[in-house]
Image: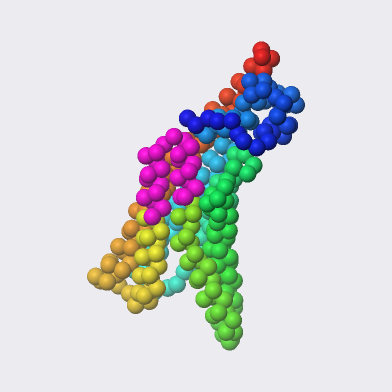
Amino acid sequence: MAQFRLSGMPVCLRCGYDLRATPSEAACPECGLAAHRSVIEHSHPDDCPPGWVGMIGAASVMLLVSYVGFGFFLIAILINSTASASSLDEGILYILLVLAISHAVGNFFIARDDRRGASKGIWRVNRWLLRIVPLFPIAGLGMFIYGFRFAFWLIYGQTPSWVDEMNDLSYWLILSVVLCPAVTFFRLRWLALRLSRPKLAEHVTIVAVGCTASLALLIVCVFFEWGDIRHADISFFLLMVLPAALVGLFDLWATLLLFVVSRRFLQSAREARARWKLADASRGEL
Ligand SMILES: [Zn+2]
């Protein structure tokens, strides 16, 4: 396990007290937290600030919910596309919006670092992408729902041209979802490595590439074939079922990985809480 003294000014992780004059074996003079918790970098979540570890666990659960929901949506849309030519149900759009929000909140919180300024270079870029990219599908869905309602109200009148333009823009915003797995799993890979799970990290890499490629394939197929396919023939299976099945497979795989990561982080949060408490209790003996 990598452990080294941090460069830069050491401050207590709990109360922010300046620990430059405090030896790492001592306790923080302000709040009593063992100083080594703050001045030595602990990479394994079992030793990291319990609040942060718990938050990563909770954020992974939110991501898990959105990936499970997306899997169900995929099944629903596939059944719907054979059953009838009817377009999306408004209720499904609202469920999708809730899933997209859960996805964005999960991404926002897995972007948090365990200490201030820990992310540098490519990781800073990743953190900002985690916060920004998941907002595009939410904006797209919101505009789509608004346009959907607007078109519905005006069904007997004239639909203004800006509704069509807004719909085009909302499609592009929703399609940006293809970028999300890569951004999310880039971060998850780093979290898996911190858990000392290199095998898990390998799975994460495969899933990141698989999710992005299969989503892109599905979008291309839908773009060219949507509306042409009305019944279950060979092109339906090749251009709709096959890409959707691939997306479903990687979605399931991603779900399993998120399950492992969230469970492990929630366990680590309990462990970290116990260790920090122990470090607090032993300060009297120092
Ligand atoms: Zn302190």
Q: Is residue 24 visible?
A: yes
Expressed as whole percent of the image width and height from the top left, the position of residue 263 reads: 47, 37
Most distant residue in the left direction: 234
Q: What residue appears at the point 48 percent right and 57 percent down from the top-left corner?
A: 180
Q: Is residue 215 above or below residue 42?
A: below
- Magenta-colored stretch includes residue 196: yes
Colouring of the image: rainbow
Closer to the camera in the image, 240 or 130? 130
Is most of the magenta stretch helix, strand or loop?
helix
Q: Is residue 132 left or right of residue 215?
A: right
Q: Is residue 33 left or right of residue 225?
A: right
- Magenta-colored stretch includes residue 95: no
Most distant residue in the right direction: 30
Q: Give the residues drawn in magenta, as a range.
A: 185-209
Closer to the camera in the image, 222 or 21? 21
Q: Is residue 274 above or below residue 124?
A: above
